[in-house]
Image (tube, grey):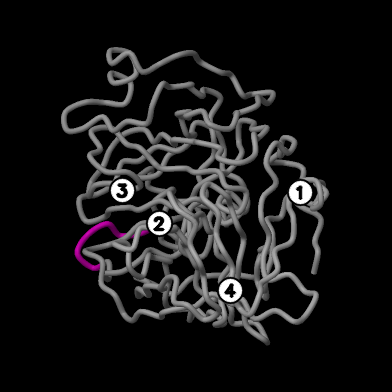
Amino acid sequence: MADAQSPGTALVLEEDVLPGVLSDRQIEGLIAKHAIMSETGWDDDQVQPASLDLRLAADVYRVRASFLPGGGRTVGKSLGGGGLHMHRIDITEGAVLETGCVYLALLQESLSLPASLSGRANPKSSTGRIDVFTRLVTDRAESFDTVAPGYQGPLFLEICPRTYSILARKGDRLAQLRLRAGPQETVKELIFRVDLSGDPGEPVGWRARRHAGIVDLRKLGGHAVADYWEPVFTHQGRLVLHPDEFYILASKESVRVPITQAAEMAPIAPELGEFRAHYAGFFDPGFGTNQGGSKAVLEVRSRDVPFILEDGQPVGKLVYERLSARPAKTYGQSGNNYQGQALKLSKHFVDTA
């Protein structure tokens, strides 16, 4: 991250901020003005082209169930007075967060936003691809993953590993925050379809193995694919999704995000209800602008009944928004892991490409 105190990075927090998603320069300006704060120093690569990576603090709480504090209540009061808190875990040196359990983690970052700015959070790509379900929680929140305009207070992350238990440590990044000036304004939408047309003998996706080992969040490229995943093949362009199984698939379309825009993946028809086709949904400016383009990787989970996916079936959409200002860097310029991707597992596994 550039020096937040350097000249020219400060964001003017008044009416002259253009509507749209804030870029890296503007996020750094907020840091310089202490509208975004941290209990520790900032990592060099923490500010992305149109988002901010959020880091776990030392305190993680095992809770009985997911919850929202609601209007007028802080997260702390909800934990202390609602009978939700089971025990505290110190992850400074690392601790295992187990599948099927719900945790609430304090984040290192906190906010003191002006009234003109709001926020939205999403799991990072690598988080979604190992089937770790996360949602941002704020004081007085009545919905997940949203930061109200002018919010002042701490940030918390609900963490629920679904398939693999994870080894987490203070400073690990599981989610990211996108800030916006003014209301959301959609520039365009792109419908994308699932690709189940693989060559003979080539997998079209991956299905997570049950009862696999722990995923160490800092052991990048250090987990054997065969220990955690099995390849998925189709029959005549069809794939049956089994209930409660987790799949990694890819889109037919290549995705491109112009450097003056940001995108977010969203359900195409949430009323269908048979499956969920994404967990992590932010696409930064510059994604897919490499030669050859980049596919959208889909984290797919069927729900209560088996469901048949057909090759070319629409499964989601990308919603594009304008940036408030041009970013200093674009996706792929700082060692991002998924530029030029096709069907690709998370960075924790040995690269199969």
Real-space CA distance between mark 1 and mark 3, rounded to the nearest whole angstrom:
30 Å
Give the mark nearest the N terminus, 3 or 2: 3
Residue 226 appearing in the image: yes
In this view, the mark in front (3 or 2): 3
Decide whether the magenta segment is chiefly helix, strand or loop. loop
Q: What residue type is labelled 4?
A: Arg
- Residue that badge 2 annotates: 178
Residue 250 lies in what quarter of the image? bottom right
* 282 is higher (above) or lower (below) than 68: below
- Residue that badge 4 annotates: 238
Report the front residue among 315 and 347: 315
Check residue 169 in the rendering and tell me which mark sits there, or answer none: none
Q: Give the range drawn in magenta.
A: 11-16
Q: Where is residue 28 in the image (x, y as percent from the top left)?
A: 46, 55
Identified at 61% across, 41% down, the residue is: 163
**Left or right relative to 29: residue 228:** right
Q: Position of residue 71 (x, y in %)?
A: 17, 33
In this view, the mark in front (3 or 4): 4
In this view, the mark in front (2 or 1): 1
Check residue 146 in the rendering and tell me which mark sits there, or answer none: 3
Give the mark nearest the N terminus, 1 or 3: 3
